[in-house]
Structures are given as C-alpha cells and as structure tokens.
Image (cartoon, rainbow, N blue to C red):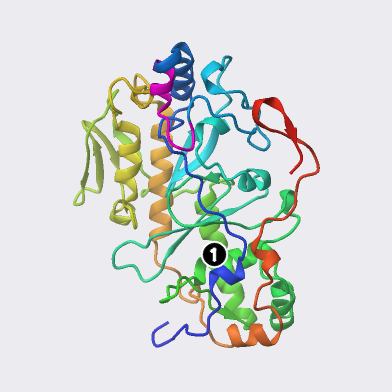
Amino acid sequence: MPGVTYDDAPPLADLMPWSVAPPRLGREWPTAPDPGCLRARWEALLAAEGPEREALFEPTRSRTAHTAVGQLPGRTGGTGKLARASGPCPEPVRVLAAPFDEQWLIPDHRLIDAARPELWRVADARQIFTVETAAAPGATRPLLLATSLLPVLRTGRVRPLYRRPGAGEPNLAPGLLEHLAARLGHRPDPVDVLAWTLTALRRSADGPVVPLTGDAQLWTAGVRAGRRTLWLMRRDGERPKLPGGRRPYVRAPLPARPLTLHYDRAEETLHLDGGRIAPVPPAAWDFETGSGRVLEQWFAARTGQGEPGTLAAIHPAAWPQAWTSELLELITVLALLAEPRPRGDEPAVADAIGVAELRAAGVLPVPGTARRPATVLDHHEEGPEGQFALI
C-alpha cells in the first residue's frame, strides 16, 4: 500500500486491551522438545537430596526448593515445598517455547518463577493467544504470533483473544464489534477481527497499529488472508501441504545425533550432518524473526548439550522420529507463510476507521476494566502447602 500513512490507525493495545507479561520460567530445564526427557529430569531431581537437589533445581530469588506456592490453575502439580517432594512427574503440556517452536513444559508452579496464573485460567481448546515478537531486520511489519498453546516466549506481551474460558468474552475494545457491524453491514466474530489484525498489523513510532476499514469487500479479503495465516500458525486442523513436487522429504536418513545444520541454496537441500531433506525452499530457510533464523533456532534447541551435571544436560539418547516429522511440517509452514499474497488479499485503508471515529463512537478510550483480567474463578484453587484460597 504505497503512500498510505497509518497516523490515525488504532493501536493494537487499544483493540485488544487486556495483555499479560510473558511467563518467566527462571530456568531452562523444565522445558524441552521431548516429554520423555522431562520425566527423566524430574526423576533425577527427586533422586537427589538436600543441597544437591537445591543445586539441581537452580534457585533464583523467586524460587528455591523451599518455596511454597499455589497450584497452577487447571493442573495437578504439588504445592508442598520441592525440597521434600516425591511422586511422578506432572504430565508435561505442549507450549510455544519460541517462534514456531512447540515444545513441552512440566506444569508445576514450583518450577516457574512467574507463571502468570491469569493466562492458565483462560487456556482451553477455544483460546487463541497472540504474542508480539521483534521484527526481523529490514522487516516492515512486526510479527504477531498466534497459537492455541500457552506461550512461554521471552518476547512481547501476551494478548488472549478471550477473557474467559469457553470463548465467553472477547478481549476486544468494548463496542468494537458493534461499530464494525454498523460499518460493514454484518457483525464479524472475534476470530475475524484477529484474522484481520494478523493481515493488517503495521509498525508505528508508538508501537503496532491495526488499520481498520469499513469497506466490506476489503474486510473480507483481509480476513480470508488472515484466517489462512492463523491456520498455519496454530496447526490445529488439517495439516498444511506444499504442492506436489515441492513437498520436503527425507532424501538421506538423519543420523542418531546430528550436530550440524547446513543449507545448500543451489540444491534447496537441508543437511543435518549426513542426513538430507529436500526440497527446502529458500524462503523457508530465510524465514526470520527478530531473534534470528527460525530453522536454525529450532535445530539448536534440539541439539544443545546443556552444561554437564545439570538437568538440562539430560536429552533423548537419539533423534526421535517425531522431530523429523515436526521439522518437515515446520519447513512447510514457513514456506507457505513466506509466499507472496495473492493480488487483492493485501488489505487497504480505503474507507478507514481511525482513532477519531472510534472516539466519536465511544469505543475509545478503553475503560480501565477492559485492561484487567476478568473474574473467572467459581471454585477454590489449592494454595501453598495444600491450603485452599478463593481468589
């Protein structure tokens, strides 16, 4: 959209007003790409006693082996002090650990410095979390990730699409859906607004903004493109595929413990030591976020050794087959996300809905209550040392 300015476009922080700082783990070992090694780490921790267990735990000012905390909402992890804990590992849960990198986490509040319980309370099958990440060098737009998993990325603030479990209340500026309905001739649902946001989000000097339009045709095109992006990022429906002849396959078996990753641009081949995957489009290899190339970071998370003697040094004995399947799908997702948008799917700001219009309609400014979490508890949550507290 050359020549278009976004000076009056509403900020993302106003359109999705409730946001939460990302969870802060405080230690790396409770997350891993493989759930089996998390159970092995837990067993190693509990096999140690006294000062050895404390050292393996890796204490911080927020958490030590003697810290008593409440149970994570919706989880069964213990609330007694970890120094005297026993029993099996809490069942690992799938999380988004880095951009486009789904890993596993031991869901025990005692292991996490700042778990953000308000996020756990609204995490369910219908929730969609968004996370703003730093833009890659030279990028014109910030990258807004969308995921069905609890995000534990150390990046920007987390904005859930819904303020309550069961998709009961959208995390949108009060009155926004009604105003869009009046302008578009139909009431969009919250997922449509998120889809448009993924397509239209732009950078400004004061942070990301979302140009809105009252043109129904432009809105439909933007929502269509955004829903495709949402499907690729969430990966919770039909599996994405590249056209026949462009689908990546394992051309030479991957070794048991690959240590190096190399891309041959001329042959469109990804080398994992002697293993080969092809074709890998250059756009998939070049896909970056502000923290670097996605494929390189994904590989590093699975081949890092961890400091000897620490729990993070406990890894699978060999490269699991599941990782190969995940890598093939990740290549596909990145390649599809990098494809140029079809003509007409780039939203424009014709018939723009700006801040001034939203203020006149009473949508802005957003009331302070919309920026705070909703009261969602209708039951007791187990507090420290098994004591129940109603929050």
Q: Which residue in the structure is indicated by mark 1?
A: 226
Is 351 colored magenta in this rendering?
no
Q: Which image quadrant: the C terminus?
A: top right
Position of 19 with respect to 40 (left or right) is right
Residue at point 35%, 19% (across, down)? 317
Residue at point 61%, 23% (across, down)? 80
Residue type, numbered disc 1: Gly
Res 73 visible: yes
Residue 337 x/y as whole percent: 43, 58
Residue at point 67%, 38% (across, down)? 73
32 or 235: which is nearer to us?
32
340 or 112: which is nearer to us?
112
Q: Is residue 67 above or below residue 130?
A: above
The magenta stretch spans which residues? 52-63
Position of 80 with respect to 167 (left or right) is left
Please tell me whether mark 1 sits on a helix, a strand or a loop.
helix
Res 253 visible: no
Q: Quadrant of residue 185?
A: bottom right
Is 61 colored magenta in this rendering?
yes
Farthest residue in the right direction? 378
Q: Quadrant of residue 230?
A: bottom right
Q: Is residue 118 above or below residue 49?
A: below
Residue 244 x/y as whole percent: 41, 49
